[in-house]
Amino acid sequence: MNKLFSLLALCLFSFCFSSCKKEIVTEYPFEIQVLFEDGTPAQNVFVEAKADVPNSIPDFEGVTDVEGKVHFEYNNKAVLKVEAKRGNPLSWIGCGFVRLEAGVEVKKVIIIQPYDASVGGC
């Protein structure tokens, strides 16, 4: 009986300490959706997300799909400036910021508007 109790105590003890490990999340996924002013998805829009600091490491580029979406993933916390541009010459533009969170796919909507050269960007 004493051996059975010792074995049970050992199993319970090892289970308690092995299951208490915290999982370290190293993924910071985010999705940018680009929409026109009327709410329709903007397809084939060039999207750039980067830290608003010279020579920064996070620098993402992509093009939206038919739903106006593009997905990225980073490996650290960050606040990124997002720019969406369409046309050559530039005819549509939209900007915003996204704050990345560990293990959570952050979703950001950018509304693009007709580009006006006199305004000079976002």
Image (cartoon, rainbow, N blue to C red):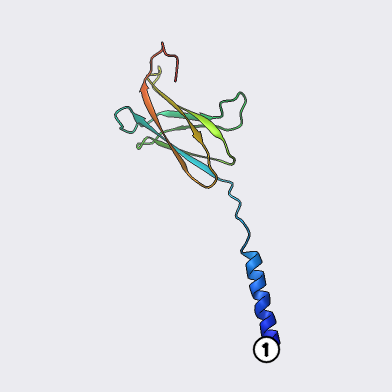
Bin the neighbour count of mark 1 within 10 Å (Cα to Cα): few under 14, some 14-19, many 20 and up: few
Q: Which residue is mark 1?
A: 1
- Does residue 92 sit above or below 4 in this rendering? above
Residue at the (51%, 42%) spot, across then down: 29
Q: Is residue 84 visible?
A: no
**Which quadrant of the figure contains the N terminus?**
bottom right
Q: Is residue 102 visible?
A: yes
- Does residue 31 sit above or below 5 in this rendering? above
Residue at the (36%, 22%) spot, across then down: 113
- Residue 55, image x, y percentages: 62, 25
- Residue 73, image x, y percentages: 52, 41
Residue at the (38%, 30%) spot, across then down: 44
Q: Kindly state the secondary structure of the residue where label 1 is placed.
A: loop
Q: Is residue 4 left or right of residue 61?
A: right
Residue at the (40%, 29%) spot, across then down: 45
Task: Determine which quarter of the picture holds residue 38.
Answer: top left
Task: Check the image and name the residue furthest to the top.
Answer: 118
Task: Determine which quarter of the picture holds residue 94.
Answer: top left
Count the numbered circles shown: 1
